[in-house]
């Protein structure tokens, strides 16, 4: 009985996620679900992407268990940001996205980035209306993340490695990380981006534009 209940919950979420996706796609909105651990640098990455995607219209949905710290940081830079506080839930779901979309004014032919809850397990299992998932991993977390949390990497169209300036300080094994990523997600490209300086973000933006073009085609 527990399995059937779980299946029913996921089926309803997936149905609603499909409706959200079709509604956004019909307006030319390309939606990116951003996964990553707490402190991986997701918000800093979005700041650098927003700079480089301008003047394209762009909006961000920030998901957190509590607080609107990240949303306020984005708004301070002029980024159209909206906050979802789950109050304990470990990931965003389609009903949450549907509810916040009702409060947003998203321009047609725009970008929508959804920063999911800091967690490499639950967000990977759920769809919320996105076109693609991307996963953010920082060198400070260690080089073993693709091995320990394979689903998050398997379901992501690309992986972004952040805080590269800390590699030597934390003895990050980049070869080991790349090998793990290749083993679980051989088709996912890896981008190294410094969230403070923006170094490496241009290549990621080029890839995102190509992904959007492919989705529209």
Image (tube, helix red, strand yellow):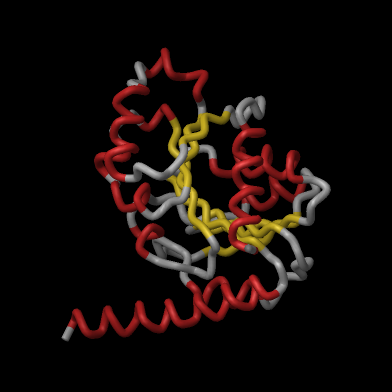
Q: Residue at x 22, y 84 (%)?
A: 4
Q: Residue 156 vs residue 205: left or right?
A: left
The relative height of residue 171 versus residue 60 in the rendered view (above or below) is: above
Residue at the left extreme of this rendering: 1
Q: Residue 97 at x, y = what percent?
A: 56, 71
Which of 56 and 89 lies nearest the eye of the viewer?
Answer: 56
82 or 19, which is in the foreground?
A: 19
**Depth order, front residue of 7/157:** 157
Q: Residue at x 16, y 86 (%)?
A: 1
x%, y% of residue 204? Answer: 60, 38
**Which residue is farthest top?**
168
Q: Quadrant of the C terminus?
A: bottom right
Q: Residue at x 35, y 51 (%)?
A: 154
Label total for image: 0
Question: Image height check: is 148 above or below 62?
Answer: above
Residue 199 left/right relative to 162: right
Left or right of residue 110, residue 7 in this image: left
Residue beneath the point at 61% across and 47% down: 208
How far across and how far down the image is residue 67, in percent?
A: 57, 55
Question: Residue 6's spot in the image, x, y percent?
Answer: 27, 79
Q: Is residue 12 above or below residue 198?
A: below
210 relative position to 78: left or right = left
Residue with the most extreme front position: 217
């Amino acid at each position: 009985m527990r399995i059937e209940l779980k299946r029913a919950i996921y089926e309803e979420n997936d149905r609603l996620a499909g409706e959200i996706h079709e509604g956004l796609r019909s307006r030319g909105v390309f939606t990116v679900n951003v996964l990553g651990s707490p402190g991986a640098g997701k918000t800093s990455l979005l700041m650098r992407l927003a700079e480089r995607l301008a003047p394209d219209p762009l909006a961000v949905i920030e998901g957190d268990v509590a607080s609107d710290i990240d949303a306020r940081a984005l708004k301070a830079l002029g980024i159209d940001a909206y906050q979802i506080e789950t109050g304990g839930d470990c990931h965003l779901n389609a009903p949450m996205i549907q509810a916040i979309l009702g409060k947003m004014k998203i321009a047609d032919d725009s970008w929508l980035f959804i920063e999911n809850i800091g967690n490499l397990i639950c967000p990977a299992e759920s769809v919320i209306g996105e076109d693609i998932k991307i996963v953010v991993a920082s060198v400070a977390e260690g080089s073993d993340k693709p091995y320990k949390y394979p689903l998050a990497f398997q379901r992501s169209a690309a992986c972004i490695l952040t805080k590269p300036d800390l590699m030597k300080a934390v003895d990050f094994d980049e070869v080991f990380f790349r090998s793990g990523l290749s083993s679980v997600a051989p088709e996912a490209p890896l981008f190294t981006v410094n969230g403070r300086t923006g170094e490496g973000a241009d290549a990621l933006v080029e890839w995102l534009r190509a992904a959007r073009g492919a989705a529209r085609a």
